[in-house]
Amino acid sequence: MTAARVFSASGVLFLFLLSCGGRCVVELTGGTTVGCDLVPPGPDDPAFGTAALVLVADSSGRDRLWVGFEDEAEVAEFETLACGELGFFVGGRVVVASNRELGFFFDPRTTEVRESPDTDHVTSLGEISANPRAFAEASLSQGVSWFVPAAVVASEPPVFCDSGA
């Protein structure tokens, strides 16, 4: 038996599927599924972005983080870069959050994507997670946004790239 719950928040639709077999899966609007340990932030969560949510992973795939976007122009830039051939970076001001697996999130009001950000502000999810307070303090005191390589696992709404066919 499977129970399902659908909700929409600011145009973002999630379908939660809970299986009685103990396996919990979240199906995103594009059909991508992620485990319940990767449930995207909801509208009452400060990490939620009203324009988009993007799940990024580090190069090992071990550390993963939902990144919220408030700025439609940044979402458009994300879509362009996500469909391109080159790698890119996502980041923003770091907010400490002890209730998060990595201990932080990027403030959705400051989230940006860049093809090549200032290398002084490029780091990794793991480095931020090791000391989120230091990164958050630098964000506040120096107005610094931190960037991580953006290996995109999923996005809400989903990005569909034109294959040129």
Image (cartoon, grey):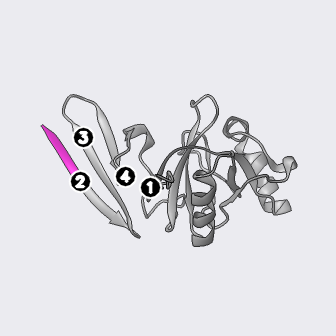
User: How far apart, in angstroms, are the residues tagged by discs 2 and 4?
Assistant: 16 Å
Circle 4: element type: loop
For the N terminus, the image quarter is top left
Amino acid type, residue under disc 3 in the picture: Leu
CB within 8 Å, label 2 to label 3: no
Q: Position of residue 9 (x, y in %)?
A: 38, 66
Which amino acid, mark 1? Answer: Pro
Which is closer to the viewer, label 2 or label 4?
Answer: 4
Tell which circle, 1 or 2, labels the residue nearer the N-terminal end: 2
Give whichever of discs 1 and 4 has the lower sequence position: 4
What residue would you read off at disc 4?
30
Query: Label 1 neighbourhood size at 10 Å, few (<14), some (14-19), many (20+)?
Result: some
Quadrant for residue 157, please give it.
Answer: bottom left
Q: Nearer the viewer, mark 1 or mark 2?
A: 1
Span highlighted in magenta in the image: 1-5
Q: CA distance from mark 4 to mark 3?
A: 18 Å
What is the number of callouts on the image?
4
Question: Viewer-nearest of labels 4 and 3?
Answer: 4
Q: Position of residue 165 (x, y in %)?
A: 46, 52
Q: Which residue is mark 3?
A: 18
Q: Which residue is mark 2?
A: 5
Find residue 162 and report its horizontal and vertical position in percent: 49, 55
Q: Looking at the image, do the residues carrying marks 3 and 1 touch, with CB atoms under 8 Å apart?
A: no
In front of the other: label 3 or label 1? 1
Q: Secondary structure at mark 2?
A: strand
